Image: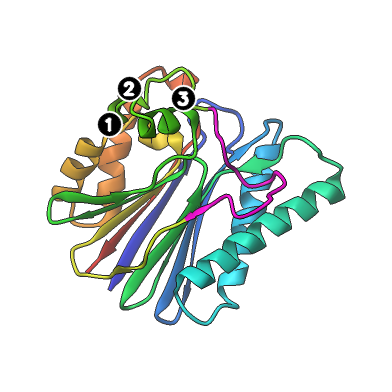
Amino acid sequence: MITYRLLSRTGGRTDNEDYVNARELGDRCCFVAADGLGGHQKGEVASRAAAEQILSEFAAVKEVSAKSIRQCMEAGQQALMELKRELGHRDGMKTTMAVLMMDRKKAVWAHVGDTRIYVFRKGKLLARTKDHSVPQMLVEAGELTEDQIRGHYARNQLLQVMGVPWDGPQYTVAEPLPLKKGQAYLLCTDGFWELVEEEEMLACLQSSKNPSVWLSKMEKLLLGRGRPEEMDNYSAIGIYVG
């Protein structure tokens, strides 16, 4: 059995350019988390448009697979590019995206940008998506450590997003992971993960009986840091496999 909770807040901003949602179809489900870029509500439009197209495309695919999630990501990108042309926006209207699909046997995910997916089980972090960003690139080059990404001056410089022309797929697709009881998944935008470290995510998870409690505990940590008026939008989806 899969249980989940969605969370999305404006933080200290006027508009919420994040977008999270889920769709259940029989024994299949799809979760999306996106962080729009562009300001003046352009990011808000971009994140919603791409994510809703992905959820719509999910209804058309017949299985949870790497092929299906690629189809959904391509559909989201195409829809966003067409919307930009219709509105006459050459710049702005871009978004990050994290997509997680599940059925009774497996999970598969894809992402572009720095909206992340975490997988936990038995008190351990099993997997985390790697950001398409300058700091992550520096980590891969051995010039930074993972824990230095959060405070890096170029953390918001993204190398790959939706809403710009693609010569080829700009997203990363993970290998399908067998679904097992006790797994927990977290999709979250950078406004969330920048203020809650992985060890804290895990500690909150271990003392939470359901996804609602888990997200509430992490949100409490997040709100206790920094100045509220300077906070970015923050959003997350917590998922338990029972």
**Residue at (33% x, 72% y) in the render:** 106
Inspect this view and state whether residue 15 appears.
Answer: yes
Residue 217's place in the image compared with 153, above or below, is below
Numbered badge on residue 221: 1
Q: Indicate the amino acid at tag 1.
A: Leu
**Residue ID for mark 3:** 231
Q: Indicate the amino acid at tag 2.
A: Arg
Magenta segment: 157-172
Figure quadrant of the C terminus: bottom left
Residue 80's place in the image compared with 189, above or below, is below
Numbered badge on residue 225: 2
**Residue at (37% x, 76% y) in the render:** 103
Question: Which is more N-terminal, label 3 or label 2?
Answer: 2
In-image side of 23 versus 118 (left or right): right
Give the SS element for disc 2: loop
Q: Which residue is nearer to you in this view: 23 or 104? A: 104
**Image x and y of residue 204, in percent:** 19, 43
Q: Please say if the residues under marks 3 and 1 sit with CB atoms less than 8 Å apart.
A: no
